[in-house]
Structures are given as C-alpha cells and as structure tokens.
Amino acid sequence: MDHFELAPELAEEISAHALECYPEEACGIIAGDGDAGTKLYRGRNLSATPRVAFELDPETLARQLDFETAGLTMTAIYHSHPSGPATPSEADIVQALYPDSVTIVCSLADLSSPVLRAFQIAQGQVREVSLEGTARTCSCLERANLARRQLRPLDIWYGDGSPGGGVLEPGAGYLKGHAVCY
Ligand SMILES: [Zn+2]
C-alpha cells in the first residue's frame, strides 16, 4: 500500500480529538474498506502513563465486531504525540499488534498546526503511507482555526498563583507547547 485514502473530515476529527486530549495521547480506530478510512471511533487511552503512551480500551476495539458484520475492516489505528514528531516511536513499532491496519500518528509539537502521517508497521519494519489528498483539503489556516476552537482560552494571571495575585486578562492566552503564550 502506497496511499491511504483518509476522508478529510476524519483528518480533522483526529486533530480535534488529539487537541482535546492534550497533553495526553488520544487514540482511536478507523473503519473502512481496502486502502480507505471512512468512519472514526474515538477510543479511551487506558495507559498508566497517558502523556507518553497509549493503550486502546477493549470496548472500542470490540467495535470491530459491529463494522465487520457490515463488511468493513479496521483499516487504521490513530494516536497522537502531544509533543513528539508524527513518526512512530520505538514503543509504537514494538507494540504494533495489527499489521493489517495503518498506523496514523498525529503530532501536536506545533499546537496550532497538527501534523498527520501514516505508516505500515509489520514485524518491526516501518513504511510510510501517503495521505496526500487529505492534506490538501486541510490547509494550514484551517488547522490553526481548529486549534483555536478546540483550545480553551486561558486567563492571564499576575502574581505566581499564590493569594495576592489575580486575573489580569481573562481568556487572552493560549496553551502552546508546554508554555502559555500570550
Ligand atoms: Zn506513539
């Protein structure tokens, strides 16, 4: 497989889910047919260290039974890297249990511009799969707007958080990376 056809609204949905779970990893599965993904199921991350790992909940994995009766398969599994790159980590490669499903990684290293990349991982071998076409419909501006919609504006505080400080400008800051930027 050289190309995976991810419906553009699913690409948006993955980015939105990743931003909602930030700074923890989001994860979920995608049903489809052949080299295409057409329906997304958000999962819950059961990992004990959800900021650096993910473990899909069994209920979401069991959804496969529903869509398989409809003739679809789990064509992709997605998860996010809250601060890492959009490439599989060592653990992602070792723990890839579904060689027939494409692994989609969403990087939030730049929160205003989530990056999606897709890979086939089988027996420790990683091969990138193109998401071209999906990326064209998801412009930088749209991604930035999505990030702004999903992130709750933060209050800018004065003082160090101890009594005596207070809100200087409500809702004027946004989370970016690990720091609040104004
Ligand atoms: Zn990962």
Image (cartoon, rainbow, N blue to C red):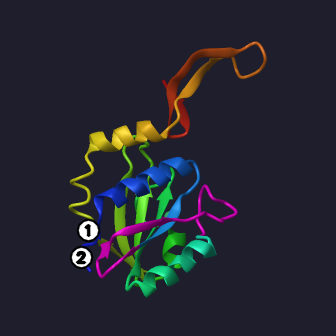
Question: Where residue 76 appears, x then y in whole percent?
Answer: 41, 73
Query: Which residue lies at the image location 27% right of the left edge and 50% below the top edge?
Result: 138
Residue that numbered label 1 is attached to: 130
Disc 1 packing (10 Å; few <14; some 14–19; many ≥20): some
Determine which quarter of the picture holds residue 11.
bottom left
Disc 2 packing (10 Å; few <14; some 14–19; many ≥20): few
Residue that numbered label 2 is attached to: 2
Secondary structure, mark 2, is: loop
Segment tinted magenta in the rendering: 31-55
Question: Where residue 19 appears, x then y in whole percent?
Answer: 49, 48
> Relative to residue 4, is residue 108 drawn left or right?
right
Residue 168 or residue 122, whichever sits in front: 168
Magenta: main secondary structure equals loop
Secondary structure, mark 1, is: loop
Query: Which residue lies at the image location 27% right of the left edge and 65% below the top edge?
Result: 131
Amino acid marked by disc 2: Asp
Amino acid marked by disc 1: Ser
Q: Are marks 1 and 2 in contact (CB under 8 Å)?
A: yes
> Ligand 1 closer than 8 Å to the CB at disc 2?
no
The span from disc 1 to disc 2 (Cα, nearest Å) is 6 Å
